[in-house]
Image (cartoon, helix red, strand yellow):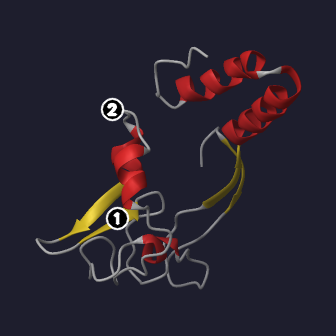
Amino acid sequence: MNEEILFTIRYKAGGYGLGSPFANHFAPTSSGSNVVNGDGSGWNHPSYDFMNNAYEPGDARRDITVDTYGNATWVKNYSKKFLSPVSNTFDAENDWPVLRYSDVLLMLAEVINETEGPANALPLINQVREVHGQLPTLPW
């Protein structure tokens, strides 16, 4: 939880039946307990194109968002967003954010872009980029 999150689905680990399965679902398959306790399901894995082209050079978000796991013969990409320590498989305490303040700003920017043009939407997009440490701001 943080001030950015407006609405989230909360989970509680500890064997209560209220834990989040996402740490295991998003970890790569065949990783054993090297990425998360109890192996992964490999859900929502980023494509190789995404891994190579989605982030601008020096964008700090890449290292905290995605990673690779593998050996000399195979490599699997995975999202790190919902990884957290788990004692029991499918029983993590990472919440699922449904709506963030940045989402609202970006939806508003999309409406302004369609109704008034990109120049008027750009300040909202740059506000999101600045908050999340992705500088420089876009000039267009």
Give the residue at x 38% y 64%.
Answer: 78
Q: Position of residue 66 (x, y in %)?
A: 38, 55
Amino acid marked by disc 1? Asn
**Residue 98 versus residue 100 in the image, above or below:** below
Residue under label 1: 77
Outermost residue, left direction? Answer: 72
Crowding around mark 2 (Cα neighbors within 10 Å: few <14, some 14 to 19, many 20+) is few
> Residue 79, image x and y in percent?
43, 61
Q: Using the rendered view, name the quadrant where residue 10 is placed.
A: bottom right
Q: Give the CA distance from mark 1 to mark 2.
A: 19 Å
Give x and y (percent) for residue 103: 71, 41
**Mark 1 or 2 closer to N-term?**
2
Q: Is disc 1 in contact with disc 2, using a CB cutoff of under 8 Å?
A: no
Q: Secondary structure at mark 2?
A: loop
Please report the residue visible at 48 percent of the width from the left and 72 percent of the height from the top: 92
Q: Is residue 19 left or right of residue 124?
A: left
Q: Give the label on residue 57, or none.
A: 2
**Drawn side of residue 97 relative to residue 13, left or right:** right
Number of marks in the image? 2
Q: Secondary structure at mark 1?
A: strand
The picture quadrant where one finds residue 4 is: top right
Which circle marks residue 65 in the picture?
A: none
Quadrant, the C terminus? top right
Tell me the kind of residue under disc 2.
Answer: Pro
